[in-house]
C-alpha cells in the first residue's frame, strides 16, 4: 500500500458515519475521497456508498450474497446506492450492480491492478455466518463494465465455491 493510498484510506475511514444499535454495528454512509495513481499520475475520485436495513416490503431480490439463504435467512443490511466520480466524471452505477450484495462491509479504494491497465476496480465484501463473499466492480472509460462476485463457504455440511459475473452494456 502506498503512502497516498494509506493517507486516503485513513481519510475515508474518518468520513464513515457509524451508528451502533444494541445488537450490531452498522454503516449508513461510507464516503471515500482522494486520489489514486493511474499510470504514474494522481487521479481524483469520490466514492459514496449508502446502506440501509433490509426490508421484506421494499427489497424484492430473490437471492442475496452474504446471507445463509438455505436456512431461510435474509441479510440485515444491504447497499441502497453507490455514487462514483472518477477523474471529474460521474460514473453511473445501476442498482443491478449492488442490490443483491447483503451485509456489505466498507469498500476498497479504487485501484488499478498493474501499470498501464485501464480498468479501475472497487472491492466489496460481506458476510453473515457461512455466507461470505467478495465482489469486484470494474470500470473502464467512465463506465461500469462488470461485477464479479465469488463465495466460498460451508453449505449443508460441505464447502462450496460459487462465482457469478454480471456484464453491463454502455448506457444500459
Image: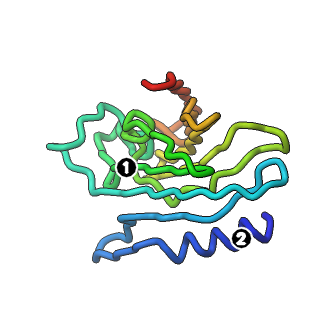
Residue 12 drawn at (x, y percent): 56, 69
For residue 18, side relative to residue 167 (left or right): left
Tell me the distance, in whole angstroms, between the alpha carbons under discs 2 and 1.
25 Å
Q: From what the image shows, is residue 67 above or below residue 118?
A: below
Label 2 secondary element: helix
- State the residue at coordinates (35%, 65%): 28
Q: In which quarter of the image is residue 99?
A: top left
Label 1 secondary element: strand
Q: Residue under circle 1?
A: 81
Residue 91 drawn at (x, y percent): 50, 42
- In which quadrant will I find the C terminus? top left
- State the residue at coordinates (42%, 41%): 98
**In the image shown, does 108 or 100 lie closer to the viewer?**
108
For residue 156, side relative to residue 1 (left or right): left
- State the residue at coordinates (47%, 45%): 131
- Residue 6: mark: 2
**In the image shown, does 1 or 169 lie closer to the viewer?**
169
**In the image shown, does 142 or 148 lie closer to the viewer?**
142
Q: From what the image shows, is residue 41 above or below residue 96?
A: below
Q: Can residue 160 be seen in this view?
A: no
Residue 128 drawn at (x, y percent): 43, 53
Q: From what the image shows, is residue 48 above or below residue 152?
A: below
For residue 48, side relative to residue 39 (left or right): left
Amino acid at each position: 500500500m502506498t503512502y497516498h493510498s494509506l493517507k486516503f484510506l485513513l481519510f475515508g475511514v474518518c468520513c464513515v458515519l457509524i451508528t451502533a444499535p444494541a445488537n450490531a454495528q452498522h454503516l449508513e454512509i461510507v464516503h471515500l475521497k482522494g486520489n489514486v495513481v493511474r499510470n504514474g499520475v494522481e487521479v481524483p475520485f469520490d466514492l459514496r456508498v449508502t446502506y440501509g436495513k433490509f426490508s421484506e416490503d421494499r427489497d424484492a431480490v430473490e437471492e442475496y450474497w452474504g446471507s445463509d439463504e438455505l436456512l431461510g435467512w435474509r441479510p440485515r443490511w444491504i447497499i441502497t446506492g453507490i455514487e462514483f466520480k472518477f477523474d471529474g466524471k460521474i460514473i453511473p452505477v445501476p442498482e443491478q450492480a449492488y442490490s443483491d450484495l447483503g451485509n456489505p462491509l466498507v469498500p476498497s479504494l479504487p485501484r488499478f491492478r498493474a501499470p498501464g491497465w485501464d480498468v479501475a476496480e472497487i472491492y466489496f465484501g460481506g458476510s453473515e455466518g457461512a455466507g461470505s463473499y467478495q465482489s469486484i466492480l470494474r470500470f473502464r472509460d467512465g463506465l461500469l463494465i462488470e461485477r464479479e462476485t465469488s463465495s466460498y463457504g460451508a453449505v449443508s455440511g460441505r464447502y462450496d465455491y460459487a462465482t457469478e459475473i454480471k456484464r453491463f452494456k454502455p448506457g444500459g
